[in-house]
Amino acid sequence: MKSILITSLVFLTTLTQMRAQAPEANSKPVQFEQQVIAMESYEAVGAFDVDGDDTLDLVSGAFWYEGPEFKSRHFITTVARWGGGEYYNDFASIPMDINGDGRLDFITGSWGDQTTVWRENPGNNEMWREHLIDSTGPVECAQAWDIDGDGLPEIVPNNPGHELKFYRLENGEFVRYEVGPIQGHGLGFGDINGDGRGDLISAEHWYEGPADPFGGNWKQYQELSLGKASVPVLVEDVNGDGKNDLIVGQGHDYGLVWYEQSTDGSGQRSWITHPIDPYNAQFHTMAWEDITGDGQPELITGKRFRAHNGRDPGSGDPLGLYYFQWNGESLTKHTISYGPLGVGKGAGLFMNVTDLNGNGRNDIAVAGKDGLSVFYNQGYKTK
């Protein structure tokens, strides 16, 4: 009897310790150190090896910055302003060796000139040539996703009010493939129905990926009403139930939510709304990457500064950059940066989460009308 009692006490003590440790493991924030790179107001930043030295560099607007210190700045090309001078024709920074010369070029586009283009890396300090991919219509942002699963990405521009389409690089030229007649503000890609094929998500519809994404019919489902959604809309299994869910920010209003995918006995699909952060606005871009180093991804996002030149709800609120960690029931919010302009930092239109200094921890590069910064991941630090 005494042995059983001791064993029970040991079990209860261990269980109590585990319960006490679990919240701490989920609530203890990773620390970050900010480096301000430039006070330019471009809204996209890419991280890739521009000069072939096996070190990641930063590409943002008219300039690229040599890694790993990002202090040496090099001119790329003149990038035109529009919209009263607040915007640049540079709403993405997607790396790709387009002409096969061994150097990484990049793809961008913008709302102003209504085109998607690529800029050619010359391999020296000369100006980068710009090449037209297509007159796509106004580009809210563009994404790179492997539509056909061959290991090579296709380019998918978000063109609200225009056809949903993507571009495949074939023999040095981009070929256009249409998916649906119209798309809204917001764009995502992932396997919604669990058939092993990627589907495309727009603000009011999702399109089922066919066996042949280049010649087959993309079936449309009208199950969603996501508002002026983020680019990207993340398609991830948030709660680990084996079904992919949607994580959606409002790019021009308040709100950040995840939609839990649920199916009944007949296979009928429905979406259960779970608020993540209803108190902040302009969650226009986001990433799903491992920030904590535990092997599980976190949600990284923040506010886009002056998204519509100060005319959006919440535009005058403080800036913020955050990561959200799944705690088994919900997504716990951790603040990376917060405050008024000059104190807090937002997330812009196109961000990068990757290991920039080779220490094994993912860092965050963010551009915006509030400048270009890197937040170096310091891991867990005791104060």
Image (cartoon, grey):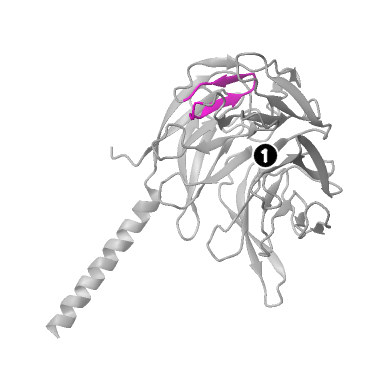
Q: Residue at x 51, y 46 (%)?
A: 289
Residue 151 in sight from this viewpoint: yes
Vertical arrangement, residue 125 with respect to residue 144, above or below: above
Instruction: Name the residue furthest left.
Output: 2
Is 210 on the left or on the right of 40, as rendered?
right
Asked which secondary structure carries label 1, the reply is: loop
Residue 234 belongs to magenta span: no
* Disc 1 residue type (three-letter): Gly
Image coordinates of residue 339 in percent, x first then y, are: 49, 29
Q: Quadrant of the C terminus?
A: top left
Image coordinates of residue 46 in percent, x first then y, are: 59, 31
Please tell me in which quadrant of the rendered image residue 259 appears: bottom right
Residue 56 belongs to magenta span: yes
The foreground one among 188 and 15 is 188
Image coordinates of residue 307 in percent, x first then y, are: 67, 30
The foreground one among 90 and 20 is 90
Image coordinates of residue 270 in percent, x first then y, are: 69, 65
Q: Quadrant of the N terminus?
A: bottom left
Task: Please state the total of marks drawn on the protein image.
Answer: 1
Label 1 environment density (alpha carbons within 10 Å; few <14, some 14–19, many ≥20): many
Vertical arrangement, residue 50 with respect to residue 142, above or below: above
Please tell me in which quadrant of the rendered image residue 50 appears: top right
Vertical arrangement, residue 56 with respect to residue 322, above or below: above
Please report the bounds of the magenta region as a residue range. Answer: 53-67
**Circle 1 residue:** 251
